[in-house]
Image (spheres, rainbow, N blue to C red):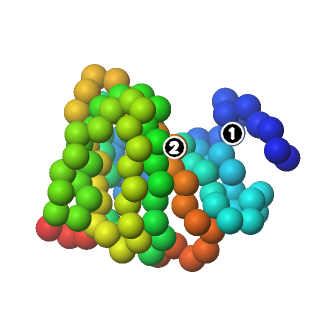
Amino acid sequence: MTVKKVNHIPSEEVKAGEGTTRQILISPEEAPNFAMRKFVINPGGGMPAHTNTVEHEQYVLSGKARIGIGDEIYEVEKDDVVFIPSGTPHWYEVTGDEPFEFLCLVPNGDDHIKILKD
C-alpha cells in the first residue's frame, strides 16, 4: 500500500522508554531501503542512553526535548532535524509540557540496540 492514514496505524509501547510509543509508518517489508517510524514521548518521559547499529534521521513534529548524542547535548523543538550516526550513544528527555513527537527514518537491515548502563 502506498497511502495510509496515520490514525489507522497501531501504536506500541517502547518498553525501554518511559511514556514512549512508536508507530511503524512504513515497514521494511513495504519499502526496499528505509523504514519510517513515528515516536511520541509524553511529558516527563524519555529514552535511556543506547546505541543502534543503524543511523537515525529524524524530523521533530512537535514538542521540546533534550537529546544527548555522543558527548553533546542538544535542545530540540518543532521543525528541527536530527542525525544520529550508527553506533553513537544517544538519549531523549522531554523538557516541555506537551508530547515530543518525531519521525525517525532508518535504513532497512539488522539493527542491534544496546541499552547503556550508568
**Is residue 96 placed above or below 3 in the rendered structure?**
above
Q: Quadrant of residue 63?
A: top left
The residue pinned by badge 1 equals 9
Q: Quadrant of the C terminus?
A: bottom left
The residue pinned by badge 2 equals 103
- Does residue 12 appear in this view? no
Q: What percent of the width, then of the height, locates residue 104?
A: 51, 50
Which residue is rendered at x = 18% and y = 57% of the image? 72
Q: Residue furthest top?
A: 97
Relative to the observer, which residue lies in front, 4 or 11? 4
Which residue is rendered at x = 68% and y = 65% of the image? 33
- Does residue 57 appear in this view? yes
Q: Quadrant of residue 70?
A: bottom left
Q: Quadrant of residue 42?
A: top left
**Is residue 118 placed above or below 19 in the rendered structure?**
below
Query: Mark 1 or 2 closer to N-term?
Result: 1
